[in-house]
Image (spheres, rainbow, N blue to C red):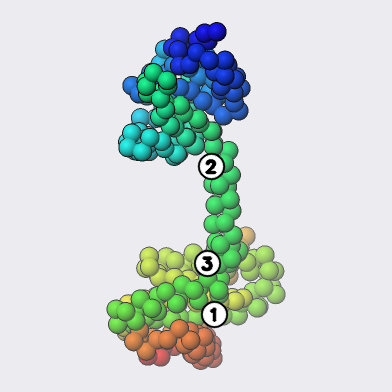
Amino acid sequence: MQIKTWGGEKLHDSIPNLYYRLAFENNVLAQFITQPSGSIICANISACQMLGWTEAELCQMNRDEIVDLDDNSYHDALKTRSDQGEVCTEIFFIRKNGSKFPARVYSKIFNDDQGNDWIITSIQDISSEKMNNSIIEKLHEETIYLANHDYLTDTLNRRGFIEHLKIEFARNKRENHFCALAILDIDYFKEVNDQYGHIVGDKILIYIVGLLKECLRPYDTIGRYGGDEFILCLPNLDSHSAEIIGERLRKHIQENPYNYDGVWINLTISIGIKLVNGLDFHQNDINHFISEVDRIMYQAKQKRNTVCISS
């Protein structure tokens, strides 16, 4: 009994070919058979449903018409399949409506009984998988961000700041540069909270951060040390430059009171600054350096609205 196969071509003349065709047509994976030139000979039901064309339409097309030719992975896949006889990769396909989707592809060259070359390709739409991976990756990034940032001021929290400081100090050590470490405290902030409430106090903390950023360089870093205290990393400064930046911050805060429903709340800060030589730095010294800066800041707090610096 002679059985015609896909596209009118005779691949086999035996009864078992019927079962191969049934398996092909009912496979949950989208599959199609092409000639080496790319002409599509047949496509199964899953391929038609996935791509949006009928089998008759697909059989009038070339594989280049259903893939994204701008996808370099496609051209790499063709070369790999030509060299090795098969390929497993991911490329973008194009539906009849013009939409593109990522697919996992397995494609293999085979021969029929007459020695003719054919290519069978299976494709699996992985749009949902890619989307899920993207969501998981985004959630992972958000988790890391939240773990290292203060929820209120969106500055680095203590943990995030210390990790940043390790990197910055290590860089300064390699380049033999100085780095200024500063801690500032908002003067009389408890009185502000007591008089206006913690909600206003939170708004003032956010406002203070905005004022600080206006005075700092793009590569300076702010962290919330705790409560109304902030910690700053100021790379590549000598003692004189660090003092200038400290005074600039102090003056900018003093000259910009916070407006709360028409009431101007005067603000000042006390700043302690210590210069760190990169060559003297060791990872275990970070807490020591921070403690030193904290001590210097408390010296400034004795006067209020003051910058104290130690080199």
* Nearest to viewer (mark 1 / mark 2): 2
Q: Does dot 3 land on a helix, a strand or a loop?
A: loop
Counting residues from the start of the chain, the first of labels 2 and 3 encountered is 2
Q: Does dot 1 land on a helix, a strand or a loop?
A: strand
* Nearest to viewer (mark 3 / mark 1): 3
Which mark identifies residue 185? 1
Q: Residue at x 45, y 83 (%)?
A: 283
Is the N terminus in the top left, top right, bottom left or bottom right quadrant?
top right
Compared to 68, does 210 lie above or below? below
In the rendered image, residue 280, in percent from the top left (x then y), is placed at: 37, 89
In-front residue for pair 19/282:
19
Residue type at mark 2 is: Lys
In-front residue for pair 159/34:
34
Counting residues from the start of the chain, the first of labels 1 and 2 encountered is 2
Residue receiving disc 3: 155
Residue type at mark 1 is: Asp
In-front residue for pair 102/81:
81
Q: Which residue is drawn at 54% across and 80% down?
A: 185
In the rendered image, residue 216, in percent from the top left (x then y), is placed at: 40, 69
Counting residues from the start of the chain, the first of labels 3 and 1 encountered is 3
Q: How far apart are marks 3 and 1 (CA)?
A: 15 Å
Q: Which residue is drawn at 55% across and 74% down?
A: 159
In the rendered image, residue 88, in percent from the top left (x then y), is placed at: 45, 39
Is the C terminus in the top left, top right, bottom left or bottom right quadrant?
bottom left
